[in-house]
Image: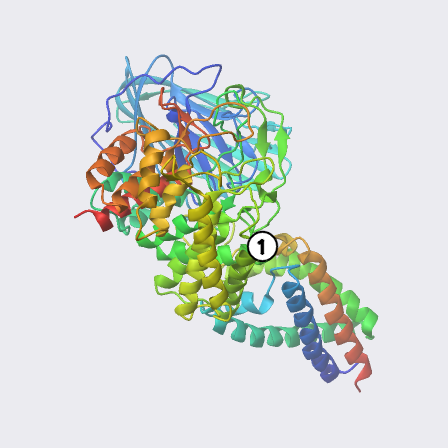
Amino acid sequence: MSVWGTVVGGLVGTFVLTTILRTASELRLTRMDLPFLLGTAVTSDRGRAKAIGYVLHFVAGVLFSLAYAIGFAALDRSGWLLGAAFGLIHGLFAGSALVNILLPIVHPRMGTPMSSIASTALLEPPGFMMLNYGRSTPVLSLASHIAYGAIVGGFASAVR
Amino acid sequence: MVASNDRLTSERPNRPQDRVDGFAPLRDYAAIGDGRTVALVARDGSIDWLTTPAIDSATVFGGLLDPGRGGSFELAPVGPFSVARRYLPGTAVLETTFVTDRGTVRVTDAMTVPADGLAPLRELVRRIDGLAGTIPMRWVVRPRFGYGAGSTRIERRGGVPVAHAGADALAVRSFDAGEPDLTMDAIAGRFEIEHGQSGLLAMSVAHQEPLIFVSRSEAEGRLAATIETWRRWSGALRTTDRWRDAVERSAIALKLLVYAPSGAVVAAPTTSLPEDIGGERNWDYRYCWIRDSAFTLDALLRLGRSSEADAFFWWLMQASQLTHPRLQVLYRIDGDPEARERVLDLRGYRGSLPVRVGNGAVDQVQHDIYGDLLETAWEYVRAGRRLDAEVGRRLAGAADHVTSIWRLPDAGIWEVRGDPRHYSHSKMMCWVALDRAVRLAEAGAIPDRSAAGWRNTRSQIEDFIWSRCWSDDKRSLVRSPGSDDLDAALLLGAHFGFDADGDRVSQTIDAVRRELKHGPFVYRYSGDDGLEGQEGAFLACSFWLVEALARRGSIEEAAELMEELVASSNDVGLYAEEIDPRSGEFLGNFPQGLTHLALLEAAFAFDEEAP
């Protein structure tokens, strides 16, 4: 298992994940836009938010790949299949807790179930498995995360 | 603590109308809310409507639609009483003063907002203040989760009365308001309150999380913070010179319909309140209609509420993304385009069946909404906001879509169920869509590649309207090409600047006034709509007539009509969708956003047009 391979896999995996979700958005299967969600945490300018969001998204992709590397090291094995399994867990965690619960709490412009007359949300919260962004979103999110994990795992084992 | 108020009430107390078979008149309700959900409080102190956790969730109190199965939270003196009510100024916190032969007591009702301390997911606070004498009081909480269909169980947890069903639960805490007594289906208490004493009932609600048992001091603190939050919000409003109170109350009513977690604005917080008592015209209005969007954004901007305006515009652009370039008539508050209709097993308000949740209009094709969308975008840009490139492309795509659909029949603004028809109002709004698209392109806000085509189609639509939708006999635009029916929606020609230089919209105003007006109230249309029964007069149309008169310069007549309509609100300044011109009885969902939006637009028109 190679840490550098994992990092490169993280970059490539994030590229593929982003492409899958962007394509799904253009096909009107989902309104989920992870770079947009991340970028609007920094600015309310929609154009700048997307640019900043892409940078943050790739940084997050690399950080997650390092977490994968820890998992590969702990199990003393790697590979695309194990990476895909990690991706499935990653996708479930992202949809159920990370983006559903944690992101609205720290995101200054996103609504939460506690938003009230005292505040004004600019972004609707994703909801469980990001279902608020379209019925196909959970499937697309899981598929793209599995693809990300498989790529990270594949690069981790392939790069020496 | 709530600020003391020596004035007992703003009106003379009178006895609430007797309930008919358990149903209070719709006029008797006041709305309280927190930006997430809304409760309706009757003049007799019963809360007969509350959905949790969101404004479009299932009810825990749905007695409004079925006093037996729906659930309610009663709080009133024991024995006969008279009532006077008001909202605390600048708030949606309700103050009900009960006058009995043994004394006077005041109840302050609020849905609170989070403040210091561990706040419940949702909280309903009812504070009781003894003002004179010693008054015996009683309260009964009958929780019925899931529109009364859930198996709600009541028991004590750590000594606190709790009701729960599935993922939902509520706890009732009583402070100096009697020891709670639990039965299979209710939590109840009795107590006496003397002059100078106060009690408090706090109901906390949980959904998919543990209940929070609130303390009195924290509940009182949240009540005070809620009043302060409302006053701060309303204090920043830009109101009009005339009808200031009605404008402020309508603004607060509109704010109650904003679902804060997403920024969406629902048409009303209720479902299936009938447009015809005992009839089938019962619809779920807990959705966001594109039709209302232009009025909503315009009203929010004029009121100086730019943060809500931005949030609403963002939500609208996000929600409409999945169906682009086609627009849906309505969207759920979370942006989901799904709103499948189903029927609940409830008695319905005074036997008005069916009780529907979901709204079948979601599957209708309505061409007018493209005009509303592009007008909304134009208002947004005109207020100095920028559209990003992606939104601009989508709006241009919507305008392109209009050029390909405007010749087709649709269901029209009034969502007539049955075969699609050609509606003059839909054609007019297609003209508005392209007119605003041209303006947006000229302002550089959206791509202008198709602008020449938009101009060309705009001219074709205008020619079509004047050649096919005008009746020389009626001296008016008519509801459909070739028909003799009138449509009050065509009054909006004055609002949107259609035929700005001609007088045919003015003649249409006269025709609507002549044929659809009954007293101060205006019916939506003449002719058949494919449904059984006769609905009431449509209050939004009545205010549209005021605006149309004001915009054509008939200021005095418009002002007289406005006075009559403002006086036709209920005792706390709220309106339903419709009114029975003979009895003054409210009909339809309540409080109705479109009615309050139309009131606001009428008041703004006076500011612009009056000398």
Which quadrant holds residue B113? top left
Way the structure is coloured: rainbow
Q: Is residue A27 left or right of residue B316?
A: right
Location of residue A132 with respect to A146 vertically, above or below: above
Q: Nearer the viewer, residue B134 or B42?
A: B42
Mark 1, residues whose alpha carbon is within 10 Å: few (<14), some, or many (≥20)? some
What x and y, as percent, mark residue B96?
32, 27
Please name the residue that numbered disc 1 is placed on.
B326
Q: Is residue B447 left or right of residue A22?
A: left
Which amino acid is tagged 1? Answer: Arg
Residue B161 in view of the camera: no
Q: Is residue B500 left or right of residue A158?
A: left
What x and y, as percent, mark residue A100?
60, 56
Location of residue A8 with respect to B168 vertically, above or below: below
Which quadrant holds residue B138? top left
Q: Nearer the viewer, residue B328 or B339?
A: B328
What x and y, as percent, mark residue B108?
34, 32
**At 43% across and 68% down in the image, what residue appears?**
B441
Q: Is residue B171 left or right of residue A85?
A: left
Residue B283 in view of the camera: yes
**At 65% across and 77% down in the image, what residue appears?**
A62
Q: Which residue is at the far left?
A: B611
Which quadrant holds residue B548? top left
What x and y, as percent, mark residue A106?
51, 62
Secondary structure, mark 1, is loop
Chain to which mark 1 belongs: B
**At 74% across and 83% down in the image, what residue appears?**
A5
